Image (cartoon, rainbow, N blue to C red):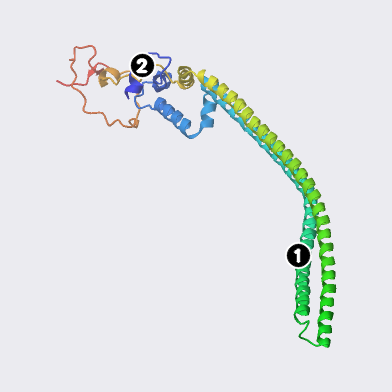
Amino acid sequence: MDFFWSSFVPLEKTFCKVMAPQMQSTDLTSTAGYDSIIQHLNDGRKNCKEYEDFLKESTLKKALEVFKQRIDSVGQSHIQLAQSFREEARKMEDFREKQKLHRKKIELIMEAIHKNRNLQYKKTVESKRLYEQRCRDKDEAEQAVHRSANLVTQKQQEKLFMKLAQTKSTLEDSDRAYQQNVNMLEKIREEWKNEHIKACEFFETQECERISYFRNALWVHVNQLSQECVQSDEKYEEIRRSLEMCNIDKDIEFFVNYRKMGNMPPAPVVYENYYNTSRNATPVRNQAPPPGIGRRGPLPIPTSGPSDPDYATVDGYSLVHH
């Protein structure tokens, strides 16, 4: 209560002016000023929008308007930045798909060459194995002929010579097939080497393009974020400047002037002598006492006598009998 009732002289920057009842009323039970302040505080806590409308034309209102405008502007810039990110993502996807399509052509060529090379390599290895086996067969046939030169019959000797001739013919065929496969493998190897070099050069070029494009995309992305931070900070600085212009005293003064109900508190309750105040008063019947005030107590004993001009009389008739 000391906060509200410390002074009732006309003050320009205090809530006490709101506490004084409207039209200088002397009704002690009036709480109009107090109710107005409580309603104002509740509105400020529960509904910021109503509080802004209530404080129109005040410095805080202007700061709130600047705050809302700048925050909306920051939100719009964020939306634009998100759109830019989506556009950059689309460009990156197009670039990636384009590289993938070109690389796929080279990969198909290299897959076919690898398959042909591996197949020819297996054939060459197999032909070499057969060639070496035929060489061993031929050597064994020759050794058999030399071992049995003086130990077998003429007919057996002829059989050994026939087998030797057959192994030599088979060896010549396997040797020829082996050499053909080696030559074919060498051609395929040369083709594979040339295509491999071209593929590596293509992949290297693609990788350079990818690194360059990706580097530039990241550079642009970081620049966009940096620019957004600078622009947002400029808007926040405008909000800070508007808040610096907020004058608490002026806002309270506006509220007081807008809601004030008087400059004076209720008058104190003084003793009123019934006989001194009722001669000119109009009698009012069945008037209920104000809230919080009980019935009037016993009548006081008059201090004046019949000779006193203020002594209560009605048309010269004394109300007190001797």
User: What label does residue 125 carry, if any?
Assistant: 1
**SS at mark 2?**
loop
Horizontal side of 283 relative to 308 (left or right) equals right
Q: Residue furthest left?
A: 322
Horizontal side of 295 relative to 136 (left or right) equals left
Q: Nearer the viewer, residue 68 or 153?
A: 153
Q: Residue furthest front?
A: 150
Q: Nearer the viewer, residue 256 or 285?
A: 256
Mark 1 Cα shell of 10 Å, populated few (<14), some (14-19), many (≥20): some
Going 17% across and 21% down the picture, which residue do you hit? 321
Q: Closer to us: mark 1 or mark 2?
A: 1
Disc 1 or 2, which lies upstream in sequence? 2
User: What label does residue 8 carry, if any?
Assistant: 2
The amino acid marked with disc number 1 is Val
Q: Quadrant of residue 261?
A: top left
The amino acid marked with disc number 2 is Phe
Query: Where is residue 102 drawn, in percent x and y?
Result: 79, 47
Query: Where is residue 162 drawn, in percent x and y?
Result: 84, 80
Q: How many marks do you count on the picture?
A: 2
Mark 2 Cα shell of 10 Å, populated few (<14), some (14-19), many (≥20): some
